[in-house]
Image (cartoon, grey):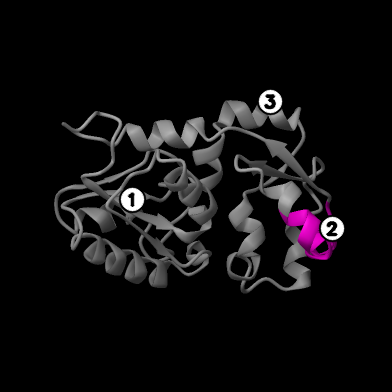
Amino acid sequence: MQTETSFRDYAIVSCGTLVPELISLRKSGFLDARKILFTRPGLHEVPRELEVRLREQVINARKYSDRIIVVYGGRYCYIDPDDAYKTIDTVLEDLGPGISRIKATHCIDMLASKEEREEMSNGEKVWWLTPGWVLYRHYVFQDWDKGKAIENFPKHTGGAILLDGIGFFDQYSQHHAEDILEYSDWMEIPIQPYEISLDRLKGLLLEQIRP
């Protein structure tokens, strides 16, 4: 008999930025979904392609289950410059029944709530990062040149805070210290890890389990 905490009747479709966290949850036994499918990280920069790839992966997910949980934010992950009323939810509605999306504004919000982030930042303006924003930075910032970086990052007086719920930073910096320094130099702000749990992400996923 299935327990309410099991995902075995579900398929997951997620932004590739969350690969590290979702794979960690799968390895821990928490996320026992039939299949986890990912879109390429950084597609929020190219909404047309995001819509195409998201549709493709939802269609692929239906091969495994009629119940699909989409791990995408609702406010910042998809912005159609030609249609302000079109959202990621309207895109999903066109794909038929059985699809739900976790209730968060973006991947940062999936790991730490607004209130938690305010406490972490101590009133400073912070650029938030996740392990995926480090691993896949060339996708996430694919069209950014140094000028755009200087325009956006230095005004974050609190630097960059990496929300780390999987022990990523210590391990990655041991083997890729130069990459971290290069990333920080490009942003022109320091990068600091902040250890968190994955409890918020777990809770958001559990909210989408239906009887």
**Residue 55: % across, % down:** 28, 66
Query: Three-letter amino acid code at disc 1?
Result: Val
Residue 188 numbered mark, or none: 2
Placement of 77 over or under 203, stated as above or below:
below
Identified at 49% across, 40% down, the residue is 110
Are the residues flagged by discs 1 and 3 in contact, CB closer than 8 Å? Answer: no
The residue lying toward the viewer, choosing from 41 and 7, is 7
Residue 180 shown in magenta: yes
Discs 1/2, front: 1
Query: Three-letter amino acid code at disc 3?
Result: Glu
Quarter of the picture holding the C terminus: top left
Magenta range: 172-189
**Residue 113: % across, % down:** 54, 31
Estimate the spatial distance between the alpha carbons at disc 3 and disc 2, rounded to whole Å. Answer: 23 Å
Estimate the spatial distance between the alpha carbons at disc 1 and disc 2, rounded to whole Å. Answer: 34 Å
Mark earlier in primary sequence (3, 2): 3
The residue lying toward the viewer, choosing from 110 and 9, is 9
Q: Main secondary structure of the magenta part?
A: helix
Residue 51 numbered mark, or none: none
Q: Is residue 189 left or right of residue 123?
A: right
Query: Three-letter amino acid code at disc 2?
Result: Glu
Placement of 84 over or under 6, stated as above or below:
below
Residue 178 shown in magenta: yes
Q: Quadrant of residue 1?
A: top left
**Residue 28: % across, % down:** 46, 41
Mark earlier in primary sequence (1, 3): 1
Q: Which residue is mark 3?
A: 119
Estimate the spatial distance between the alpha carbons at disc 1 and disc 3, rounded to whole Å. Answer: 28 Å
Dot 2: element? loop
Placement of 151 over or under 110, stated as above or below:
below
Q: Which residue is mark 1?
A: 70
